[in-house]
Amino acid sequence: MESIKENEIAPKHHTISPAIFYWGTPVVLITTENPDATFNIAPMSSAWWLGNRCMLGLGAISQTTINLLRTKQCVLNLASDSMVEAVNALARTTGSEEILSAMPGEGYKYFKKMNGYAYVPDKFGHAKLTPLKSDLIRPARIMECPAQMEAELVGVYEMMPDVDTKGFIALEVKVLRTHVHEDIRMEGQENRIDPDKWRPMIMSFQELYGLKGKKIDESVLAKIREEEYRGFSNAAEVEAVN
Ligand SMILES: Cc1cc2nc3c(=O)[nH]c(=O)nc-3n(C[C@H](O)[C@H](O)[C@H](O)COP(=O)(O)O)c2cc1C
């Protein structure tokens, strides 16, 4: 059995207490429909994928969360690493007018007010992005994003049940239809993205990065054919939901 290396080698790791654990995840621009039938956009990156589902970690008071809970519809638009201007324009903005009057004790709302967030009702205009009509749902897609997924809300989960501050929730959405720019498609393959062509924007500890231009090495996991996963992902087209 492998022995635990204690005091045998000079330690290079230190115990720290990070205020954030944002190790690096792709930036998603979520579009939702506001009560007045205009569209909201929010950049976020606490998102992970399993099958044809995406789990979104969102502030409960975000306009995006409020819209998603009410309408059950959103588009997950993935930002490429060339979209830094748009993402920075959307950063520290909210479609919720309430932050303007937030008072101490109002948690994340007051945090936003004190940290320079601005109320921006027209996020598309503000970030110079172009709305495209979706096929199955009402929220618009973002033309400039190379990947856009029309999705519907299928689950809402409590986060941090062990503490009193309950500012965040996890929302499970199901991908209904996927649109990808021809530039990132794998040649000769109907349903595949070419990872050598796809350059997602990555948010790491609040800073924006791209991936290196090349894969590090051959991946053992990638020896499994993508189509082997289809049974789990249930990724077939579905009928319209509106
Ligand atoms: C790159 C980036 C990543 C972000 N990731 C998240 C996230 O994962 N979850 C979240 O709740 N907010 C995240 N935010 C902050 C939201 O964009 C912010 O709460 C915004 O006000 C939401 O807009 P809305 O109120 O119009 O929905 C992120 C912001 C940026 C710029």
Image (cartoon, rainbow, N blue to C red):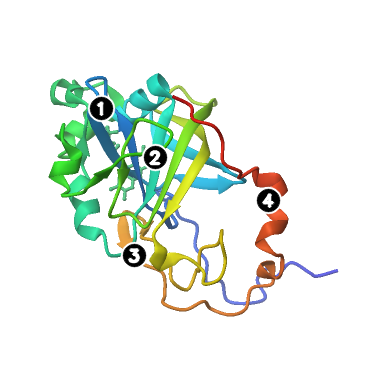
The residue where tag 3 is placed is 209
**Residues under labels 1 and 3: Cα distance?**
27 Å
User: Disc 4 marks which amino acid?
Assistant: Arg
| Comes first in the chain, label 3 or label 4 | 3
Q: CA distance from mark 1 to mark 4?
A: 41 Å
Instruction: Please report contact status of discs 1 and 3: CB closer than 8 Å, yes or no.
Output: no
Label 2 with label 4: CB-CB less than 8 Å: no
Tell me the distance, in whole angstroms, between the alpha carbons under discs 3 and 2: 23 Å
Label 2: state its secondary structure.
strand
Q: CA distance from mark 3 to mark 4?
A: 30 Å
Q: Element at badge 1?
A: helix
Q: Circle 3 sits in a helix, a strand or a loop, which is it?
A: strand
For the residue carrying disc 1, how many other residues have a C-alpha within 10 Å: few (<14), some (14-19), or many (20+)?
many
- 238 vs 196, left or right, is right
Query: Which residue is painted at 47% across and 48% down in the image?
Result: 178
Q: Nearer the viewer, mark 3 or mark 2?
A: 2
> In the shown orientation, is residue 208 left or right of residue 20?
left
User: Which residue is drawn at the image coordinates 68% and 67% (left, top)?
Assistant: 221
**Of the residues shown, which amino acid type is indicated by label 1?**
Lys
Residue 159 shows up from this direction? no
- Is label 3 or label 4 in front? 4
Q: Residue placed at 65% from the left, 42% from the top?
A: 234
Q: CA distance from mark 2 to mark 4?
A: 21 Å
Q: Looking at the rendering, which quadrant does residue 65 occupy?
A: top left
Crowd rating for badge 4 (residues with CA inside 10 Å; few <14, some 14–19, many 20+) = few
On the image, numbered disc 4 is attached to which residue?
A: 230
